[in-house]
Image (cartoon, rainbow, N blue to C red):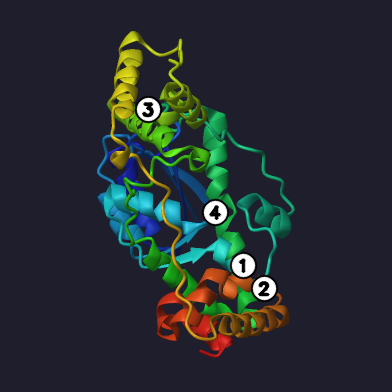
Amino acid sequence: MIASASQLAKLLPRLCHYRRIAVDTEADSLHCYFEKLCLIQLTFDGEDLLVDPLAQVDLQPLCDLLAEKEIVLQGMDFDLRLLRRTFHLPVREVFDTVIAARMLGLGEFSYAALVQKYFGVTLAKGPQKANWARRPLPPAMEAYAKNDTHYLLPLAAEMEGQMNGLGRMDWFRQSCQRALEQTLVSRERDPDAVWRVTGSGLLPPRTNAILRALWQWRDREAQQADRPSFHVLHNSELLEAARQFAEGATPQFSRLSDRRRRSLLTAAEQALELPESEWPQKPPRPLRTRTPGFDQKVEVLRRRRDEQARALTIDPAFIASRSVLEGLATDPSRAETLLVPWQRELLGL
């Protein structure tokens, strides 16, 4: 575990000699409201290392060095967003093994499935709900974390060879670059939609007004305690509480403190007093602009896509999803925004 300035100082010169480094991360989203980076896994030159972002060590030099390398990851979105949010890591080149697997037409592309396919190794299921902020990490958690990057470099080498043999390496680079660009797009929570949990669409507007108030109450409580929202109340409990309040009953949550029960009741009472004009309504379905011959255009694109996918033995949706086809049928000028060059070429755009 790299957890001191002296350990980091010894690591950095060694990393300089390698162009490609495998990276993974672990966070504590199941244990805190404000998610934080808890572990960085690195593999290079056959060695697996763990770096501790929770130690009092300046890791910016490490991030600056990684920015100059090709980073190999299994599904880049979560890891890169987490690293960028924590260290403003400006990654420029990535090798995503999920994208590589789809480029090769593999039906299963989880890390475990790929390791099994290429190396015949069955990875043990890890501690999915473990607290990665725990220190010291138990040996089993350390071993699991190291395994997350242990096979990535040989896996990338195998897949790169296959893609070169198929003449798809340039396609792969285009797709990785687009995915990297998408990690730069911020994800803002829509306050008018974030409280709409599964099942809320079946509730009448007045009950949804109560649900919205209870969700907002839960969110405040979770933030104040720095605990995940489900530690306060599960979504199913929020739904049932909203129904009971709407029917004139008062739900009992014995595990809540007296203070929380009182504040929950206050939130519900305030929602019950709202005028009908302030009740939330079902969000309107997005209108799909239908240009003349829309369905026919979508069908032409779909057939062209599926024909190419059969010839290449890849998933048709990897060339273009249904929503992308509809976007192209509506406005062909969006092709550069919706597709990378190899996808446009296959669709004749």
Q: Which residue is mark 1?
A: 102
Of the numbered discs 4 and 2, the one sitting upstream in the chain is 4
Q: Amino acid at mark 3?
A: Arg
* Mark-to-mark CA distance, 4 and 2: 32 Å
Q: Amino acid at mark 1?
A: Arg
Q: Which mark is residue 4?
A: none
Residue 329 in the image: x percent, y percent?
A: 50, 81
CA neighbours of label 3 inside 10 A, class few (<14), some (14 to 19), many (20+): some
* Mark-to-mark CA distance, 2 and 3: 42 Å
Q: Nearer the viewer, residue 207 or 114?
A: 207
* Mark-to-mark CA distance, 1 and 2: 7 Å
Q: Which residue is mark 3?
A: 227
Q: Which residue is mark 2?
A: 314
Task: Evaluate if marks 1 and 3 touch, with contact meaning CB atoms under 8 Å apart.
Answer: no
Residue at 62% from the left image edge and 65% from the top image edge: 101
Task: Evaluate if marks 2 and 3 touch, with contact meaning CB atoms under 8 Å apart.
Answer: no
Left or right for 49, reference 347: left
